[in-house]
Each structure stands twice: as structure tokens, then as C-alpha cells.
Amino acid sequence: MQPPVVFESNMIAPCGINCGACRAFLREKNSCPGCRTDSALKPKYCISCIIANCDLLAETRSGYCYDCEQVPCKRLKQLDKRYRTKYRTGLIQNLMTIKEMGMSAFLKLESDLRTCTTCGSVISVHSDHCMVCSAVTK
């Protein structure tokens, strides 16, 4: 089995999504480089993301929505609800964890949560099973 997955802070999107565990990042063909990367390889929906392109976000020191005066805004609430409902991941909770515990602690929690216990691969935030060995997650 591989060692636990290690995620990097530059792969955490402003909204709290772990791009390193995103299906678009993990796929082999036309892989997305992540929200914080300027690249033509990013999917159009990422390039035009309301949150990533938010003027208020640009004014924050941290570059994360938790630092915004309007957190949680309508768009973040909608995205959080979709991710909690469909993918069992709370983006607002992710942001509060980063704010309260720090990025290192959040990355450790993500590593523990997103490492397949069967083969050690990354488990996508968008899936309930490992994309490599098909083991079902919790």
C-alpha cells in the first residue's frame, strides 16, 4: 500500500474545496490543474467560477472565503449545500476548520479522510468509492 496522500495548501480552493481530491484533477485525460492555477486547461466552469472571481475575495488577506466580510454569501451557501447533500463534504465547515485550526491541520484531516485504506490512492470528494481499486468509502 502507498503512504498516506499528501495534499498541498495551493490545492485548496477559496471556497474550501480540496482540488487535489476533485474528480477533474484526478482524471488522467484533460486533468484540471486546480482553482488557484492560471491555466487554459481548467474547465470553463472553474474559469468562470463566481467565487474564484469574486471582488471581495480579492480583498482578503488569506485568499479564502472565511476571511470575507460577507461569509457565507449566497453563492457559497448554495455550493456548500450541494456538496453536503451530494458529496458529504461541507465547504463552510472546511473553511472554518482552516480558519480555526490552520491549514496544516486541515490538510492532515483531508489526508486521513481522502486516503483509500485499501490501496492508498486518493479518494475523490465526488465519489463514494476509490477510483483505483473501487473500495467503498465510509
Image (cartoon, helix red, strand yellow):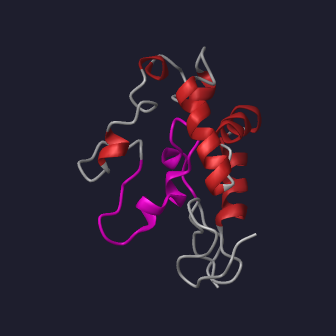
Q: Nearer the viewer, residue 4 or 129?
A: 129
Vertical relation: 29 (above or below) 47: below
Q: Is residue 109 above or below residue 117?
A: above
Q: Residue at x 48, y 17 (%)?
A: 56
Q: Which percent across, then down, holds residue 107?
A: 65, 51
Number of labels in the image equals 0
In the image: residue 126, left or right of residue 110: left
In which quadrant of the rendered view does residue 133 lie?
bottom right
* 62 over 131 or under it: above or below: above
Quadrant in which residue 21 is drawn: bottom right
Residue 18 shown in magenta: yes
Of residues 131 and 81, the one drawn nearer to the viewer in this rendering: 81
> In the current view of this chain or complex, which residue is farthest to the left?
40
Q: Mostly what secondary structure, the magenta segment?
A: loop
* Residue drawn at point x = 59 percent, y = 82 percent: 134
Residue at screen point 57% across, 25% down:
74
Q: Is residue 76 magenta?
A: no
Q: Which residues are magenta?
A: 7-34
